[in-house]
Amino acid sequence: LKRAAVLAGIAIAIAGCTVPGEGINPAPVPPADAGSPGSDGGAHDAGARKRTVMQRNPFGNVAETENLLWDGDFEWFSAFSDQYGWLAGSSAATLDFTFKDVRVGAACRSGIKCAGLAKKQLIAGIGVASQGNKIEASFWAHLEMGECPMVKAYLVGWYSKTDPDVLLHATAMIPDAEGWCHYDTIVDARQEKPLLLIQNMTGGDVVIDDAVVKKAPMTTSLLAAHGPLTAEAVAMIEDARAAVAKLRGPHDAPPNEARRAYERWKQR
Amino acid sequence: MSARRLTALGVGLDGAASGPKPRAAFVGALAIALGTSGAARAGTFDAAGDYRLADDAIATIDFTKAPERYIPADADASCQDPMFTAVMGDDAIEGGSYITLKVNSNCAERFLFPLPKKQASYRASVWMRHGALAANVFLGYADGSGLDDLSVQLTPTGRTTSDGWVELASNAFPADGTKLARAYLKVVDYASRAGVDVDAFEVREEGEFVAQKDCAGLGDPVCGAEQVCVYNRCVFGPAAVPVLPADVVKNDVVDVLESQVRLFFGGKLSRAEYLPDAIARFEKMREAKTAWEFWSLWAAGIHALHDWHTDTNMGIAGTVRAKHRLNVCFFEGDADRSHDTWPTEAGHADILVSHVGGDGTAGLHPGDRLLAVDGMPPLVWAASLAGSDWGFHIATDPAIEADLAEALGGPWWGGGLVIRYAHDITVLRCGANGDCNGIPETIAIADLPNDGSSPDVACDNRPLYHFDAANNPDPTKHYVFDTFFRGAIAGTDPSEKIYGMVWDTLWGANDPNSSVNAQISQAILDWKANARGVILDHRAGNGGTLDAATNLTRLVRPPGVVAVTRMPMEIAGFDGPKDAAEGLAIFDDAKALTPYNVGADDWAQDLPVALILHRDGSASDYMPYGMKGAPRVRLFGPHPTAGAFSTYIELRGWGPLYWQIASGDTIGADGSSLIGHGVVPDVVVLPKQSDLIAGKDTLFEAALAWVRQELTP
């Protein structure tokens, strides 16, 4: 609450600059330093302006510092990573350390980087459990077409059905004016580390950003529908569990001549 | 021996202790709520949304015409033709045109720009959109200038536009324009199949010029707080790191980086022993005033986690050329021929020359002893680099120093700590008569020539190989890496049928048909069919995947589950089982879910198998753990393995800034937590100085002797 109040004060004080603590007001509403004397540009002229300018935090959404996902806002991704905190696959059965589709810039809800998810594709965020605590799982998705529930998301146990597999709810049926859908669900305490599975069932590309899995106050009401999932969803989740089971243990690729050549190449 | 000791290690990494900064304090700095520190802006946007290059920009690249390219003389043929297209369009962020960059694999585009012929400090920036852009400014100094090249990273400032443009900028960097041969913007696109748009590159004068200075090893105060002594040259740190987070978000950035280790790092021992120190170092970041100080404190915190899987890197030494050569490998040993005059340093093994290259050896030979580095015991010196060496690497087991010993020597790409950071070394040479009790000799690194035509020798803790020459790794290189070498042991009688394997990787890739698993499986078949004894030489075990470790155990034991993996971290901030009973409960719960399976029904029940270890971690911990105790197995090594019983997750900033964090633990069938507890060899034996002088391989000889007495009838 204190942070929110302070940030609200900032927002008022600088009237138009994007708030740095982007978790509070992460939407890339382009207030544009173009209209802010002393920063970029002169008078605001929405009719003639070809673009607006915004200030993002290049270190991402730092407002949530207890995120149980390794990298919920994708800011620490690189195409050169071998073993990153998100898995990807063309199906649940092919989930692997192959996440590569990063998006950069204004397409993202916060920070500089976010994830692209082509139609029918699936990504899975690796998290940790918080035993004895209810969990709130949320993320944002930007849709090109379709309604919010066409992005399917589940919080599932990594290994087994000890914990219920939960479908995350969209908070609205249709995207907001900027094209974003918000998904936010509170689930009961879990025993196993979770996977946040997100599947694009729309007909177009989707951008994913600001995924957060965090402890929720125990007094919070559960918002998840714990009813049975569809047979198709159950099968998909089982495939995902089988895929990640293959990834257990360490992964240390050997040094080789190619790596040394790359190191030399970097020198000039 | 010199009594001089380094007392100023950790340049810029150990600032004054400070507590968290009150959040409310950031209300003051609201005028420009940037995500990065208060560097002056480059260009600005006009009312129409067009970008205007800064009035005081002293260099730009004009993308309205073909920019002047630079192609290194040794560039691959695939990198010769232009790898960009010019685009004229109103969507350019500046000037009506931009380029779309799409470079070939292992290539880059380099666009030349002029800098004034004077000594000055600059800041560079460029705009990009779609995908991502690796961008750096490269300053190439003229031959004979006496200056090292400098590569300057550009990272996001946070300024973005609604149509997708993202600004990248450098920290201020020094350039001596009077001695420059060339300056160029080097760019590589990634994360976009269609390529990345690039526009509005500009360079502005900003900051104070810092001259390159020679230095005499790490900690030389001549380098000041913002530079680090690498290869006897003060290297400008800010060139290699991202911008400093602005005051209004600095605490939050620290919170996030800190939470990554608090929530996800380690297992029982590593969290208890190492995490508090790391957190304390992270806390100092809140008071950092410069980008270099901020990120250096962060790197020191990562290294304080003291874990085999936990690393960071960012390539500060990338463009600084090694000026000297020491084509020599060291390892831990027993200096039995020189203890009379130079006793073993308490708590540390002796350091001996394992093997040397064809030249550039400073006249050192196998068996010669490294007594000191910069006046300190070699392993104490190497451990002290944790606060300064961005590539610092160490075992998780607190008692194991094999990684440090191996990294002392060798080439710049595989160790080379002495050449990179030391001022001098003190050695004790052994005479041709085997006398090692002479007078120590201190060699200044600056006196070592940087010449010779022989290959760089890699350090693999193997003084010798033991197959016929055709089957051995090349002894002039020791490049084992991801190759398997097999054969009959040379010098044994054919009737003994003693075979062996030399290899370093267990990268099975969770695929039974992978190259590694296929070779292990074939070796097992061959040995079962033909061998009466086997010697496995895995003295530079780089790890890999669990399946390959399992695969090898199929040779030596019946099926079973010897441990369970719990990784990456299962429960946020889990400090490990409180006791064996809780550990056993975890083992029982996970036995069916995440077992470390070993053995096979058709294991070779009569075949003696010796496994030689030295510097082994991760899957190369699991493999000996799974073999130990098998009826016909003996492990030979100088000390336990690294105890890296976990996996890791990689995280990267923009550009070369990289880190990975170990996460999770392994619980043995007895309920014990394994992380940080290396596998203890059955036969603990150190390489002897006397054997090295005599051309013998102590560990191998011990293994061979045991196999010979145990041969299958």
Image (tube, coloured by chain):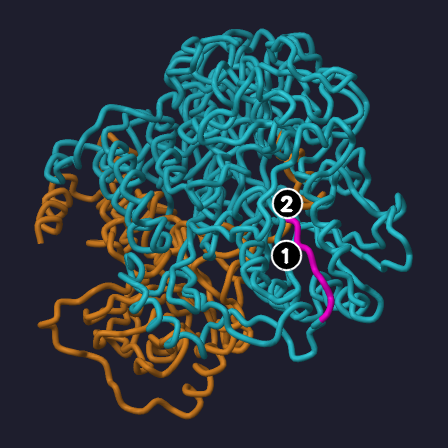
Which chain is displayed in orange in the rendered image? A
Q: Mark 1 — residue?
A: B634
Residue toward you, B674 or A184: B674
Vertical relation: B708 (above or below) A12: below
Question: What's the chain of the residue with tag 2?
Answer: B
Q: Mark 2 — residue?
A: B540
B276 lies left or right of B210? left
Residue B185, disc: none
Vertical relation: A102 (above or below) B597: above
Magenta region includes residue B607 = yes
Residue type, mark 2 in image? Ala
Q: Residue B107, image x and y in percent?
A: 68, 41
> Which residue is found at the position 35% from the left and 28% from the top?
B291
Question: What separation in Å lies between label 1 and label 2 (alpha carbons)?
Answer: 18 Å
Residue toward you, A117 or B44: A117
In the image, which residues are magenta?
A: B606-612
Query: Drawn colour of chain B?
Result: cyan
